[in-house]
Image (tube, coloured by chain):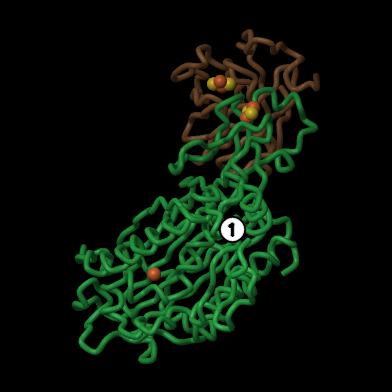
Chain colours: A brown, B green
Amino acid sequence: MIPACPLSALPRGEAVRVDADVPIAVFHTEDGEVFAIDDTCTHQDASLADGWLEGCEVECPLHASRFNLRTGAVDAPPAKRPVRTHQVHVEDDMVYVTLSEEEPNLPPGVSAGSAGAAP
Amino acid sequence: MTIIENKALPESFIKTLPGSAYSDPEMFAREQELIFEKMWFCAARSADVGKPGAFKTVQVGRESILITRSRSGEARAFFNICRHRGAQLCTEESGEVKRSFQCPYHAWTYDLDGKLVAAPNLTKMPDVDRVEYGLRKVHVREWLGYVWVCLAEEAPTFEDSVMGDVRTRLGDIESIDHYGVENLELGRRITYDVKANWKLIIENFMECYHCATIHPELTEVLPEFADGFAAQYFVGHGAEFGEDIKGFTVDGSEGFDRIPGVTEDQDRRYFAVTIRPQVFLNLVPDHVILHRMYPLAPDHTIVECDWLYLPDVVASGKDVSHSVELFHRVNQQDFDACERCQLATDSRVYADGGVLVPSEHHIGAFHEWVLNSLQGTD
Ligand code: FES
Ligand code: FES
Ligand SMILES: [Fe+2]
C-alpha cells in the first residue's frame, strides 16, 4: 500500500501521476469518487493523468482511446489492452493505493521501472 | 528619361510612390515584416471564435496565426506552428476543437491556452517545461467585436495606434462608441479576392476624387461626394445623405432603425475611417461596415467585408439586401479600379509613379508613413 497524495490536494475533475515502479494515475471524479489505474496508456507512452477525465472514464490525450476507471477496460482502438486498476482507500485525508498483482499492460518500449525515469 | 519628366511638378500635384512600390516582392516582404508583423492587425471577428475551442487561422504578414478562445472565454492567438519540429498545427481555415490542438505529426498536444499538455514519452522528459514549450503566443486584444493581434515582441499601445487612428479621423473616441459596434451582429459577409497591392486599396479608400465617376449609386445617396473631397479629408466630417434619400441603401430607400447611441449630429451621415494598416470602418446610422484586408502578395489582397446590424435586425431575418447591395457595388467598383492600376505598376511610364491632385494630397501623408515604417522610424 502506498500513500499517493492528500485528497485535499486533488480537486474534483483532476488527476495526479504518482511515481512508482509502474507509475500510477489517481483520479478524483466530478462525482467525488477516487480511482487509481496505471498511468501509462497501453498504446504508446502517454500519461493518462494528462488525459481528459469525463465521468468515470479517462480519454488518452494522444489518440483518444478511453479507459474505464472502474474496470480498466478500453473502449476503442488504437489502444487495445486494458490498464490495470488499483484499489484505493482514503484515510485521514490521505489517498492510499493498493497495487494490483496482475502484470501491467505497458506499451512497447516501456517496462516496469523505466516509465517515468529519465532516459 | 524625357525632358518633360524632369520638369518640376506643377504646384497642384504631388507624387505618388513609384510603380515598383506596388509590385516589388522585396518591398512587400519589408512591409510584411515592418508593418503587418509590427502593428495591431484586425484578425478575426470575435463571434467567429465565439466559444472555447472555436478557431480560425489567418495570414498576418509572413506568419500563419491561430486564433481561438480559452476555457475562461478569453481570445488567444498563437503562431500556428508546432514547437516540436515545426509542422503547421492547424491546416483548416476555421473549425472547432473540443479541448486541445494536436499536431498531426507526432501528436504533441496543446491546450486552449497554448500549454503543452501531452506528448509521447513526455513523462520521460521531466525537464521539459510545458509552458516554455507551449505554443508561441502573440498579443491579443478584443475591440469593436473583433480580435486584434500583434506579432511584435513589444506591442504598440492599442490606445495610441488603433484608437489613435479613429480619434484622428473622427475627432474623438466617443463618436465611435455611439455606434456600439461590439454589440452589432453580422448580417452579411462578402469576401473579395483582389489582384491588387494593399496600398492601392487604402489609397482608393482615402480619396473621393473617383466617386462621381465610378460610384453612381453612392454619389446618389451622398451627393457631396461629387465634389471629390468628402471621403476622409476633413476631421470629424461625415458626408450628408441627399435630401430625398431615406436610408443608406442602393436605391435610397428606407433603412432600419437608427442605432440607439447614434446622435442627431451623426444621423443621416456617412463616416469613413481608415485604421492602419488594414481596416476600413464605415459608419451610417443603422449599420456599420467593416473591411479587413489580408495582404498575401504584392499584387494579391483578400478583403473580408462585414455588414453589421442591430441584433434584432439580424434575429428577425429582415431583408438587408438593399443596404448590402449599396456598398457591395462600391466595393466591386473600387476593387476593379485598384486591379486596373495594379496592371500599370510595372510599366516603364509608371516607373516614377503618378500624381496626386489637391483633393488627394492627404494620401501623401500615408505614403510618408509607409516609407517611415520601412525605415523603422515612425
Ligand atoms: S497513446 Fe493512448 S491511445 Fe495512443
Ligand atoms: S512536429 Fe508537431 S509533434 Fe512533431
Ligand atoms: Fe471608392
Q: Is residue B83 above or below residue B145?
A: above
Q: Residue at x 64, y 41 (%)?
A: A10
Q: Residue B111 at what x, y percent from top left?
A: 58, 41
Residue A26 as seen in the image, left or right of residue A58: right
Q: Residue at x 59, y 71 (%)?
A: B15
Q: Quadrant of the N terminus of chain B?
A: bottom right
Q: Residues within 10 Å of mark 1 (few under 14, many from 20)?
A: some
Label 1's element? loop
Determine which quarter of the picture holds residue B329.
Answer: bottom left
Residue B43 position, x and y percent, is 52, 56
Q: Position of residue B173 (x, y in %)?
A: 53, 81
Quarter the C terminus of chain B occupies: bottom right
Going by the image, does B96 lie left or right of B365? left
Work out which residue is located at the far top of the displayed protein and give it.
A103
Which one is in front, B346 or B226?
Answer: B346
Ligand 2 image-quadrant field: top right
Q: Is residue B54 above or below residue B121?
A: below
Q: Is residue A26 visible?
A: no
In this picture, is B156 found above or below B77? Answer: below
Callout 1: chain: B
Seen in the image, is B324 located left or right of residue B266? left
Of A35 and B315, the residue lying toward us: B315
Type of the residue with mark 1:
Ala
Q: Kindly give the residue lying farthest to the front in the view shown.
A: B3
B322 or B3, which is in the foreground? B3
Instruction: Point out residue B216 in the picture as x, y percentages from the top left corner.
Output: 27, 73
- The residue that mark 1 highlights is B351
